[in-house]
Amino acid sequence: MLTKLKPRRGKIVRSREALTQEVVELQQQMEAAAERDDDAVRSAAGEPAIHKVALLPEVVTMLNKRHMMEVLIDQGMLTTLAMWLKPMPDGSLVSLQVRTDLLRVLGLLEVDETVLGSLRSSSLGKYVRLYSLHKKETAANRHTATALVEKWKRPIFGSTTAFQAENVPQRRGQTAEDLERKAMARVEEERAEGLDSFAARAEGKTQGGTRVPRPVGMDFKYMPSAKVAPLASGKAAKESTRGRLHEKMGTMKKKKGTSSQA
């Protein structure tokens, strides 16, 4: 009876070489689609950039295969994804559908020591960071991108260091590095102005250069000696002005009293 049982059907196990070849072929298609979209944006005819969108379902299907993740990382798929998320040559964002699907699929990526090196060298983190801050990005995508940045921040940017802007193309011809340099210059300028203002206040000066009056402290080590000697008694001395006036008033009272009696 055992001989009549059919062999159990199992999963088809593909070799590592076959998986690698499949990933390499997909990457070549992705790179070609990105180049065609860039050429379409640069063209004077204004051709639509639709090559990434056309290939997107196949890319998402591949990224959803967890058993392929190791092969994808080893073959540099993160760098290819960064190429897809990179803004267009004119500074505009890539297709909304591409951004939404790739940001969602990237949430499946578990960052560990084996993935850390590839993720750091791929420049994928800076473009995800860009979408977490871009004003023209949708609120849902900004939320997803922010969650990815928080997830990757510790292994990529360090446990305590904040993200630093890199050379991200901007529509107005300014890179993120230029904006960061200007921001740091403003911080240093404000800091210098604050120190100068503090020093001026410490010296008692106003902005016009005049000195602010301050009370003088009466700090004496010894009591100053008196320039006028005290009187010997409470009565005014005859040789003083007060004494002479007092004597004259007394004489006048006596004369007045004498004349009234007479």
Image: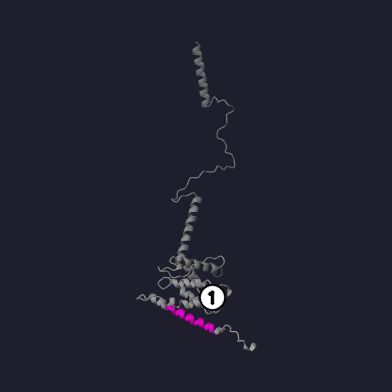
Residue at far bottom of view: 3
Q: Which residue is mark 1?
A: 118
As helix, strand or loop, the secondary structure at mark 1 comes to helix
Q: Residue furthest front?
A: 1
Closer to us: 217 or 84: 84
Residue found at x 62% / y 88%: 4
Q: Does residue 86 appear anywhere in the picture?
A: no
Q: Is residue 193 above or below residue 117?
A: above
Which residue is pictured at 50% across the width and 77% down the height?
A: 61
Q: Is residue 19 above or below residue 179?
A: below
Image spot of residue 91 (x, y percent): 41, 70
Range covered by the magenta-colored residues:
18-35
* 34 part of magenta stretch: yes
Identity, as a three-letter code, of the amino acid under mark 1: Ser
Q: Residues within 10 Å of mark 1 (few under 14, many from 20)?
A: some
x, y percent for residue 248: 50, 21
Query: Outermost residue, top direction?
Result: 262
Q: Position of residue 25 (x, y in %)?
A: 49, 82
Of 173 and 259, which appears nearest the observer? 173
Q: Main secondary structure of the magenta part?
A: helix
Residue 96 visible: yes
**Residue 87 is a magenta residue:** no
Residue 194 is situated, as x and y percent measured from the top left of the image, at: 48, 55
Depicted 114 relative to depicted 159: above or below: below
Q: Residue at x 48, y 73 (%)?
A: 102
Please name the residue shown 57% across and 75% down the image.
Answer: 114
